Amino acid sequence: MLNLATETDIERLRQAALLLEQENARLFCRLETLAAELREARGEEARNLQLEIAHLREQLASRTKALFGDSSEWRPCAEHKTDEGKEPRRGHGPREQKVLPIVEVTHELDESYQACPSCSGDLHPIAGQFEEADEIDVVERSFRVVRHKRQKYRCRCGAGIETAPGPDKLVAGGGYSNDFAVDVTTAKLADHLPLERQVRQMARDGLDVDSSTLWEQTWHLSRHLLPTYEANHAHVLSSNVIAVDETRWRLMNKGTLKRWRVWPVAQEDAVSHRLLPSRSTEAARTVLGDYAGVATYDGYKAYDALSREREGSGLTLAHCWAHVRRKFFEAGPHYPEAGAMIDRIAQLYAIEAEAKRASPEERLATLAALRAKRSKPVLDEIRNWLMTQRALQRSALGKAIAYTRGLWPGLVRFLADPKIPLGTNSVERALRGVAVGRKNHYGSRSERGARAAALFCSLIEWAKLCGVEPRAYLGEAARGAILRPDTLALARDAM
């Protein structure tokens, strides 16, 4: 028998389907009316009707895709080569394991089989001759109780008594090791394994624990790493060029659902997430502080307001070509002419890729020369294309064109400074962990938990960008070596 919640969900889906069917019927009726008018219209009136029909077809297709389509933004274009020159795709066979330890196991014939099949003489081992084959094995995780016995000392005079110190702990008198807290935190916020699922796994391995205990370990570890988190944020804002964005985060506090926002700020080798209750200008001000440099963003108005408020302070805004491409990609299925814009944006990114072949010392100079010689003509073509296109303002193509025109000064700012990237891909990559975690554990149950999640997402992504294994990094920090950005390279070499 279906429970009440399931029955409610089914009823909601049924009502949504009926509303969608009614809306589609209205659109089809309107489409037939416009088609009849088009057959009788001439000249400019016919052109306007064609645009209206294209917009209706776009709406119908968008509703269908919302229900049944995928969200991929991949599109073949002139700059996408075939398989020629690409590294061959890996199969499902074994791969070379450069990190795993090797354990050798020697297999010998049973005595009953140590006889020659031809003459029945004894078989003797051939020194140093083996047939070798490798296989991947698993070492089962296990838990143990470590009983720390702190030796007591006293003086014969009876006045002095001392006790040997115990291990460093995240919280005085805690019953779990620092490595245990690191393991729980990494599993949740790097591997996106909810605490309740960890509890069930640990029970199978013999450990009796509850999710609230695991959460307390994560919380104590976050307090210990707070100075590192703040140092990381200061390190990001010390860069001349950063990328900024924001995304939603659920806060389920005391039975109420609130939509907070994660505000990531990224530079080449670090990222910092701030969690705030809104996406207002005040929130943007809190995240950026007194930052004076170039901030690449997606056109969100809060940054525009902050820039006007701080005019003359050194804050400069640049816009993201990846978001422009996304607008035209969404219009592409309904307006084939959008493909020309997507191909030109692909040319811009292909030019950027060429500069990566230069040595690190010459890369900026090479990029500046390529942008002046090859990117600028492409931008001129794009601008001319935008000025000659005609589309309904409320259509996907019209909105994409208006979006690009409105951001044009910030979109061409990269020509003046080779350090400015074409887009905010760096910060969007840093948000993948946030998005996956949001889907797996649905956000946080308290403001405390949300802030701890922002802290660990920052440090975990920071470690990844610097080539440090997140568990090893958090473990080193938990042992008291608070790593700052200028010592992270040394830590990476040591690990």
Image (cartoon, rainbow, N blue to C red):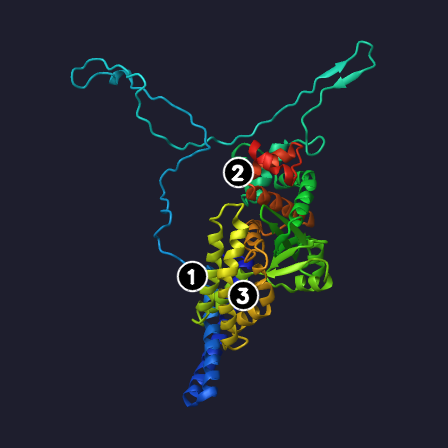
Q: Give the camera-side residue of 267 and 18.
A: 267
Is residue 258 rendered to the left or right of residue 21? right
Residue 124's disc is none
Residue 12 shows which numbered tag?
3
Labels 1 and 3 touching (C-beta < 8 A) = no
Q: Nearer the viewer, residue 159 or 268?
A: 268
Q: Give the percent coordinates (x, y) of residue 442.
A: 58, 52
Residue linked to disc 1? 75
Q: Nearer the viewer, residue 13 or 30?
A: 30
Between the residue at mark 1 and the residue at mark 3, the CA separation in whole angstroms equals 35 Å
Task: Please indicate, yes or no, whether residue 353 appears anywhere in the rendered image.
Answer: yes
Residue drawn at the location 46% of the way across and 57% of the way down: 350
Q: How crowded is mark 3: few (under 14 residues within 10 Å), some or many (20 or more)?
A: few
Amino acid type at mark 2: Gln
Identity of the residue furthest to the top in this view: 156
Foreground pick, 90 / 151: 90
Residue 157 left/right relative to 324:
right
**Coordinates of residue 492 in the picture (x, y in percent):** 57, 36
Residue under numbered circle 2: 201
Q: What amino acid does circle 1 point to?
A: Arg
Badge 1 or badge 2: first in the primary sequence: 1
Distance CA(mark 3)–CA(mark 2):
35 Å
